[in-house]
Amino acid sequence: MRPFTYERPDATREALKAAAAHAAPPGEGRIRAPAHYLAGGTNLLDLMKIGVAHPSALINIGPLHTEHGRIEASVEGLALGALVRMAEAQEHPAILRDYPVIAQTLQLAANQQLRNMASLAGNVLQRTRCNYFRDPSWRACNKREPGTGCAALEGNNRHLAVLGVSDHCIAHYPGDFANALAALGADVSILALDGTARRIPFEELHRLPGDTPHVETALQPGELITGFHVPAGPWTRRSLYVKVRDRESFAFATASAAVALHIEAGEVREARIGLGGLAAKPWRAREAEAALRGRRLDEHTAQEAAEVAFCGAVTHSENGFKPELGRRTLVRALLQAAEMEA
Amino acid sequence: MEITLKVNGTERHLAVDVRTTLLDALREHLDLTGTKKGCDLGQCGACTVLMDGRRVLSCFTLAVAAQGAEVTTIEGLATEDGPLHPMQQAFLEQDAYQCGYCTPGQILSAIACVEEGHARTDDEIREYMSGNLCRCAAYPKIVAAIQQAKPQMERA
């Protein structure tokens, strides 16, 4: 680990001021940003130890939990503070009852120690598990070192993405919770360095790799996520998360589906679908949602929706199985959600 | 830099490099070597300690950021001449280890597992103990030890 300076601001304003003192030029990827906010540290310290991240300054925002650690459920929806710990949200009564898909994405992620540490915003911003990104002894990684190429294209890519990829990067977004946020049409609140607040659709937070895979989010240097807002809707109670992985617990998704359904008189009024482990960013399958609207949900229509969801899939040497695994995962999630009492 | 940690009820002052993890501070600076360094990358659970009652990984916690929290390590569970913690006793009686390297982390994780209310069934114990790997595969006996200690902890 390389040396860094350490600051522990007592208030959000102070944190932004500290970040402003180290601001990077706009457009730089976060890996190369000189200052990083430290919350739970479960991803950042990992990346620092393996030599992928080397910030020159850490700004510990953990103590700001009092400002950004609240969970509030109302008729409008669910507000989640950025520094709520995963373990705090995974068993919150209102989330369990009204947003089961959110609770499940958290319960099925990582393990209890990590969930006790990790913040929701840090979880959302976790980096890909692509082996070539995580091992600097491989020179070619456009995400880690822009312009060096992509060793994964013809390498070990079994876990990597089939949706939203480019010729420059096929890294997958590895998280779970973000897929529920994408499916449910959440917003994310962001503070700029000068304290200006903005709120954008969660789907716009992560960017597709294109030819700049090192720029992963819409966040400008020093910007701070303060919370997430999940709108209420008649589909949130009939919702669940199916996660398929290589071992039964404490493993990243090989394929996963977050679904929420509003079914009335036997017909799908609204379907919300997020896919995980399969895409370059938290993925909302809007075409699959549209394919279900106004129809009965059965094996046939679920299969049709799943076909639509993966019609743009691009596979590489070792991940040709993923579109079919993704389709089956989505079909299973849809049929299970249809069976729920909601 | 100078920091103050509260470990097993005692305030300890130490001088560390800012990069020092809580794990290394405990082992190398405070001579509390019961907390084990396994992978040092958050994947094995051997370094599990309690911070303010919550189980966390000390390898992913900077010592400087652990200031202000109550840290409990395996050394803090029982006094030298007092009785063992029910979970320690249960691990002994169930023979819930072979090499013992993962055991301090297993025991602290197991105590938290019971206190969180995540030890209602064998399946739930397995799920909520999944962050503690055991290369000797003593898993069935670890589950049995937790089942044994749970009613004693709940009575206490």
Image (cartoon, coloured by chain):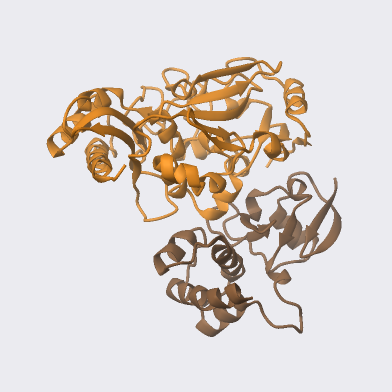
Chain colours: A orange, B brown
Judge left or right: residue A58 versus residue A115: right
**Could you say where residue A185 lies in the image, as x and y percent from the top left?**
41, 26
The residue sitting at 45% across, 49% down in the picture is A107
Query: In the rendered picture of this protein, how many numbered marks are placed on residues?
Result: 0
User: Quarter of the image containing the N terminus of chain A?
Assistant: top right
Residue B143, given in percent of the width and then of the height, sits at 46, 72
Question: On the rendered structure, is A37 left or right of A327?
Answer: right
Which image quadrant is residue A71 in? top right
Left or right, residue B150 beside residue B60? left
Q: On screen, A111 above or below A298?
A: below
Q: Residue at x 66, y 31 (%)?
A: A36
Name the outermost residue toward the left.
A300
Is A266 above or below relative to B98?
above
Residue found 43% across the figure and 63% down from its top: B124
Q: Quadrant of the C terminus of chain A?
A: top left
**Quarter-wise, where is residue B99 in the image?**
bottom right
Tell which of A112 and A337 is nearer to you: A337
Q: What's the residue at 76%, 31% (across, down)?
A: A11
Relative image position of residue B25 (x, y in whole percent): 75, 56
**Vertical relation: A63 (above or below) A188:** below
Does the image show residue A172? Answer: no
In depth, the one of B72 and A42 nearer the eye is: B72
* A95 or A26: nearer the viewer: A95
Residue A53 visible in this rendered orientation of the protein: yes
